[in-house]
Image: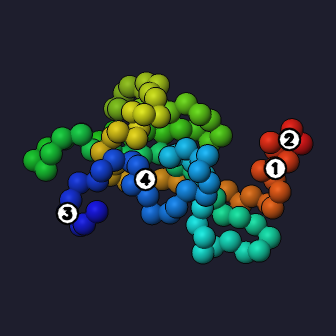
Amino acid sequence: MRPGQPSGGATERAASPSSSSAGPTEGLQDEGCAPSSTTCRYALFAVISHKGDLSGGHYVVFVRPSGGRQWYQCDDAWVTAVSERDVLRCQAYMLFYEHDHVLPGAEEQAANGF
């Protein structure tokens, strides 16, 4: 994307997915930040979107509470549940990620129920 051009939606990323099983809004990994004892991972938790054009419009935010799977659209006085697909299709203005340090083997232990 070049400066001054509209975003292609919330699917454009500055980091690469950490695995092929990760969804488009979770599991991003910053390869340059991880010391040998931890892995730095990022999960998308909010997107600010502008609806309209340069002469006018309206901002809304899509948010997913930490650890949750459900997305919500906050639009003035209204908060409504939306699908992840709705979030991915929006015209993203700004993306917010939460940082998570994962210890080596922690994902494997979680998958095994430990």
Select label 4 or label 1 by which is in front.
Answer: 1
83 relative position to 49: left or right: right
Distance (Cα) linking label 4 and label 1: 28 Å
Distance (Cα) linking label 3 and label 1: 43 Å
In the image, what residue type sits under mark 3? Gly
Assess whether mark 2 and mark 1 are in contact (beta carbons under 8 angstroms). Answer: yes
The label number, if any, that marks residue 95 in the structure image: 4
Q: Residue furthest front?
A: 20
Which residue matches tag 3? 4
Which residue matches tag 1? 108
Above or below, 35 relative to 60: below
Which residue matches tag 2? 112
In the image, what residue type sits under mark 4? Leu
Distance (Cα) linking label 4 and label 3: 17 Å
Q: Is residue 49 visible?
A: yes
- Secondary-structure class at tag 1: helix
